[in-house]
Image (cartoon, rainbow, N blue to C red):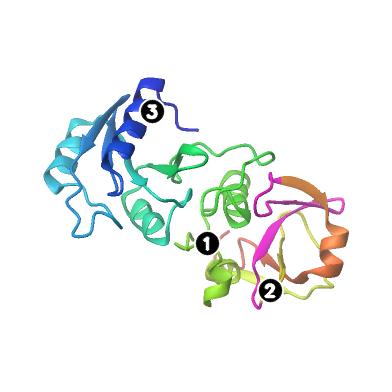
Amino acid sequence: MFEISPRCRDDMVEHARAEAPRESCGLILDDTYVPCRNVADDPVRSFQIDGEAMVLARQSGRLRAVVHSHPDGPACPTRTDMAYQAEGEIPWGIVALNPVHGAELFFFGDSLPIAPYEGRVFRHGVADCYALVRDWYRRERALTLPLTPRDPAWWDSGQNVIEDNLGQFEFDALGPNEDLEVGDVPLFQVASTVINHTGIYLGHGLILHHLSNRLSRVDVLGPWRQKFHRKTMRLGSLADRGGV
């Protein structure tokens, strides 16, 4: 969780509302929000902070996060947001403005503490099924799985994010009838032409997973295995990966 003061939060939201329909942008230095000018060619659809301002912020040693707004949603990072945040490693914050629900502020990035596995509120690209698998492997196995920038409903646009990412990290594909081991990653196909859901097998017939628009939780694997299970990905041993 990214801790900031109520004043810092209010300043970010106020700036986002003042700049709409343009995207606002700014920096968090210590616990102070510093508004910046959006110098993007199309500030309604994107943002860019002046390069000199970024250099000075980094040199100060006080830079904690980059912030921008989504004046008309979505309340999750876009594919572009995810790509640029991963390049810079500094956490990003997004202020999503919604005429019904008001302003929603969230932060994301691998440098933030890993949230508890259960009870996460769903947010695509930040707290979803693949993010849960990545976090489990980062904490339990000290492995950082690939992070593919993706838009919501990527499975409807030809991407095969989950299977492709695991395939990059020497996971072996097992058939749907193989016995499972703790840490295995079952792959599910739910109303889609490609694999679009996953989780972590915990043993004793239980799976940790995160469904869209629900809290992350532990479920009995049986019904999922019968209806939606297509294959299982298992990380090879250290010997298989060239280790000791």
Instruction: Determine the CA span between mark 1 and mark 2.
Output: 25 Å
Q: Is the residue 115 above or below the residue 135 in the image? A: above
Q: Secondary structure at mark 1?
A: loop
Instruction: Determine the CA span between mark 2 and mark 3.
Output: 45 Å
Residue for badge 1:
152
Q: Of the residues under marks 2 and 3, which one precedes in the sequence?
A: 3
Instruction: Determine the CA span between mark 3 and mark 1.
Output: 26 Å
* Labels 2 and 3 touching (C-beta < 8 A): no
User: Would you say residue 115 is visible in this rendering?
Assistant: yes
Q: Is residue 58 inside the magenta stretch?
A: no
Q: Quadrant of residue 164?
A: bottom right
- Residue 138 rendering spot, x and y as whole percentages: 56, 48
Residue for badge 3:
9
206 or 78, which is in the foreground?
Answer: 78
Question: Which label lies toward us, 1 or 2?
Answer: 1
User: Would you say residue 159 is visible in this rendering?
Assistant: no
What residue range appears in magenta?
193-216
Q: Which residue is located at x 33 percent, y 41 percent?
A: 67
84 relative position to 208: left or right: left
Q: Secondary structure at mark 2?
A: strand
- Residue 161 rendering spot, x and y as whole percentages: 55, 68
Q: Secondary structure at mark 3?
A: helix
Q: Of the residues under marks 1 and 2, which one precedes in the sequence?
A: 1
Q: Is the residue 230 above or below the residue 86 in the image? A: below
Decide: few, some or many residues near mark 2? Use Cα within 10 Å; few <14, some 14-19, many ≥20.
some
- Residue 220 rendering spot, x and y as whole percentages: 85, 52
Amino acid on which the number 3 mark rests in the picture: Arg
* Labels 1 and 2 touching (C-beta < 8 A): no
Query: Outermost residue, left direction?
Result: 52
Residue for badge 2:
173
